[in-house]
Image (cartoon, rainbow, N blue to C red):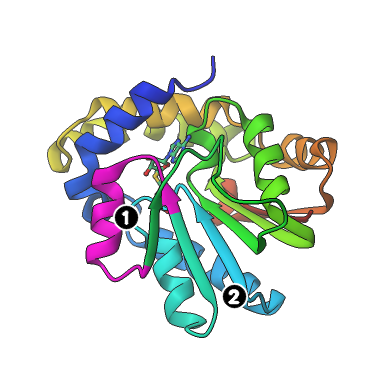
Amino acid sequence: MAPDAEYVHAAFSAIAPRYVAVNHILSLGVDILWRSRAVELVADWKPSSLLDVATGTGDLALDIQRELPEIEVLGVDFCKPMLEIARRRGLRHALCADAMRLPFKPARFDVLTTAFGLRNMQDYRGALHEFRRVLRSGGHLLVLDFSIPEGVISSATYRFYLHHILPRLAGLFATSASAYFYLGESIERFPRRGAMCDLLVDVGYSDAVCIPLLGGIAAIYFAQA
Ligand SMILES: C[S@@+](CC[C@H](N)C(=O)[O-])C[C@H]1O[C@@H](n2cnc3c(N)ncnc32)[C@H](O)[C@@H]1O
């Protein structure tokens, strides 16, 4: 079943104050390396305008704003407590909006990024259509999100960590361990590698590419609108 928007909104509102710290602790800082790989790709596309959807506390948008200070970087999220932190951390343009109905005219942006966001949306296909609508023709989409490793042993080990260890560890640091049980379920549901590339092509994107990260526990997907 797809994630419920009300649940997602409430869960992120609850974990917002500790989101940045808990993320870095639980991922041992590797999420920082993944985002910097995403920033490198974005820089190669030389955009003038970029929309970061589900920007949350602004981690990816802030990295891009720092790396490419001359371009327009706009972050949107439907969770005000997360956005408030993004603003306090220095994100210049942050807007409260639902990713499923973006308040922008067609072909408004050169690049659209979303890190750990699409997986939390009610309708992946609908969201990808909406992202394509606001991208100019030939503009670039980049999705960074969790995945499940492909090998039998590595996937079983990772699933044990994801469903049994991570929520308990998170309970020690975060205000809501239940959000981290939800994390495991949402990763299981999310299309992986080939399936995600097929979905992107089905929605109308071209040249879909998947870069697995850290043995496949996360991946960057990119494609052109
Ligand atoms: C795991 S956080 C990711 C935040 C940030 N991109 C990062 O890399 O840390 C997921 C974010 O997606 C947002 N989100 C989920 N569904 C959304 C929707 N339909 N519209 C806008 N934001 C949404 C949540 O509010 C939350 O801030």
Indicate whether 41 appears above or below 3: below
As drawn, the label of residue 123 is none
Q: Residues within 10 Å of mark 2 (few under 14, many from 20)?
A: few
Q: Quadrant of residue 140?
A: bottom right
SS assignment at label 1: loop
Asked whether 84 falls inside the magenta stretch, the response is yes
Q: Could you tell me the amino acid type at mark 2?
A: Glu
Query: Who is closer to the viewer here, 93 or 199?
Result: 93
- Residue with the mark numbered 2: 40
Q: Quadrant of residue 161?
A: top left
Q: Position of residue 201 (x, y in %)?
A: 84, 42
Asked whether 193 falls inside the magenta stretch, the response is no
Q: Is residue 120 left or right of residue 198?
A: left
**Magenta region, residue range:** 76-92
SS assignment at label 2: helix
Q: Is residue 70 left or right of residue 160?
A: right
Q: Position of residue 105 (x, y in %)?
A: 65, 51
Query: Who is closer to the viewer here, 224 or 210?
Result: 224
Q: Residue furthest bottom?
A: 70
Q: Residue furthest front?
A: 105
Q: Are marks 2 and 1 in contact (CB under 8 Å)?
A: no
As drawn, the label of residue 57 is 1
- Tell me: is circle 1 under 8 Å from ligand 1: yes
Query: Who is closer to the viewer here, 179 or 97?
Result: 97
The residue at 77%/35% (across/down) is: 199
The residue at 65%/46% (across/down) is: 131
